[in-house]
Amino acid sequence: MTENVYNAIEDYGLIGDMHTCALISKIGISPQKGTQSGRMLSGYCPCNDPGANRFKSGLQHSGVIRKLECMRGSMELKVELFPAFNYARDSHNTRAKLENDLRENPLQSIHFESPTERLQVEIYADSREPDKTGFPQAKFSLEERIGLKGRGLVAWIRLAEGQTVQFVLHSPEKAVPSSATMAAYLGKMEEQTSEYWTNWTRKCVFRGHYRETVERSLLILKLLTYKPTGAIVAAPTFSLPENVGGSRNWDYRYSWVRDTTFTLYVFLKMGYRAEAESYVNFIFDRIFPHAAQDIEPGSKRPFLPLMFTIRGEYDIPEVELSHLDGYRGSRPVRIGNAAVFHTQLDIYGELLDSIYLYNKHGNPITYDQWASIRRMVNYVASVRHTKDMSIWESRGQIQNFIYSKVMLWVALDRGIRLAEKRSSLPCPDRFRWVQIRDELYDEIMEKGFNEERGHFCQSYESRDVVDASILIAPLVFFIAPNDPRFISTLKRILQSPKKEGLYSAKMIFRYDHVKANDGVGGGEGAFIMVTFWLVEALARAASYDVAIPNIWKLALAHFDNILSYANHLGMFSEEVAISGEQMGNTPQAFSHLACISAAINLEKLGLEKAGRE
């Protein structure tokens, strides 16, 4: 496939039903010209979900409904359906008896079957005034395509005003009605779906200036949730590149322990207690049991895996699919993730911070949960001097990364705070935790801050490298937002890359890839999540007299600037290229979590600022 046939990443919207989800392009493509021939998903209904064309039955089978309707005049279009099972590795058989006369045959079926998967498609035609305007006209055929392992559907369809054709994709286990009741069935599915998402969105308690942005991000997070377990995937896609043609192509279809803090904070603050409870259950039912297992001497298994499947498993081997070209030629295409057993010690800080927030804003933790927490805090104390790969999952040399050290401090601090708030729970190690926490703080300030250059470093070893992950420090109350050490680091970050900063077009890069060899190679765009962290850091610092002119206006300007990079549906990917294109897997949960957190705190701090004035 030539590069000009690929749609831009930001041209896609998300549909889903909390069991599975899919990306839908807003643009129809002419296979001959690679050009736009029609807009498909150009907007969501107000207070409604991207999943308005998905349904879910009582039998727990998901499906997709695509409705083609001519509102006025007439239109001709070509529909192609070529399934590629098991990442285009499996062949399939196609069964269908298709008739071109849609008046006589308004409901028709196609069956695709591979050795491991099956798909059924219903085609339903209807007309508002069949005696006056007639029925849609169609020409169906089953065709082969070079490189694909089975026949697919090609349909030429002509619609006049008031005519519709609907494609229903579903598992064969899900029965659909006859042609006599199909119209009522599809109408009911659409109505129920719209009603569900409208009611869900109305639960949001945020009433600030950025309400629509917050609601859109919450919808995305809900769609990234797997309802049976409460897990939330980092993104629903894999191997969308961080740089076109580069090798930074990862599989994000898993639930990272690292996401727990922001997820719980957002759900609890926005009024979604049930979602918070579901996610906490995932943490305690799927994650914490691993902490209770003894680690055999010499075992490479960490105290906790970094990520889990949506069902709570952690056997996630990384595989390269060499038969696939990748997005715009970006290879390798990877599924699975080799980082699952990386040593990334920051996850304990995020996890224990989330438990602390849940105990504070949700339900009190139980004794059995506290026993697991104590075990985890003691483990943190034992590994505080250990090197790791940290938040950016470096595949280079392990180091004493500052971000991980800060989050280890957070883990100790939240364990201590929990013990203080729940004083009835036994904590024989409390004084030792306090001593270790305070010693670690002094160590970070001594080894993690470059006095000569005036900024926090990426690691004890990489003292000349500035890393945007330090922006989390005031957000987790490690350091005051007006502390001179943090302010001088903030000023360094706000310099351009030519001046050894990380700032370009009001966006932030993670770190300098030339100075910091992360073992991956290639380039990447500005990082959306850390740019939202910048907004929060600026806003928090604005409450004090700091040596950054117009800092409050700077925070607002940067927030509005990031929002301009969202797509037509308010979706963010992981990164933004120099060209302004979205890059990386999309939609990115952490981008939307950071967006909501920034909006919450801008509103809160803005009201406080107005009160002082």
Image (cartoon, grey):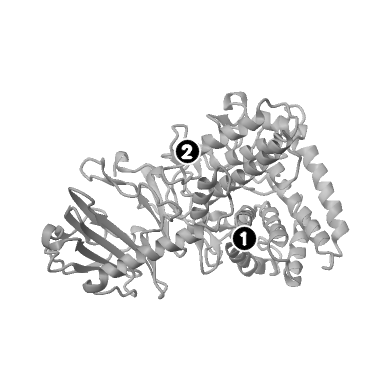
Residue 551 as seen in the image, left or right of residue 102: right
Q: Secondary structure at mark 1?
A: loop
Residue 613 as seen in the image, left or right of residue 434: left
1 or 2: mark nearer the eye: 2
Distance of label 1 from label 2 (alpha carbons): 33 Å
Closer to the camera, 180 or 253? Answer: 180
Percent position of residue 526, x then y: 53, 36
Percent position of residue 29, x then y: 26, 45
Bin the neighbour count of mark 2 within 10 Å (Cα to Cα): few under 14, some 14-19, many 20 and up.
some
Closer to the camera, 542 or 575? Answer: 542
Amino acid type, residue under disc 1 in the picture: Pro
- Residue placed under numbered mark 2 in the picture: 565
Closer to the camera, 275 or 292? Answer: 275
First in sequence: mark 1 vs mark 2:
1
- Residue placed under numbered mark 1 in the picture: 305
Q: Is residue 401 visible?
A: no
Placement of the N terminus among the 4 image quadrants = top left
Amino acid type, residue under disc 2 in the picture: Tyr
Bin the neighbour count of mark 1 within 10 Å (Cα to Cα): few under 14, some 14-19, many 20 and up.
many
CB atoms at circles 1 and 2 under 8 Å apart?
no
Q: Is residue 263 visible?
A: yes
Residue 555 falls in image quadrant: top right
Percent position of residue 522, x then y: 49, 38
- Which residue: 64% across, 62% down? 301
Residue 477 as seen in the image, left or right of residue 306: right
Q: Is residue 592 above or below residue 178?
A: above
- Which residue: 40% across, 66% down? 192
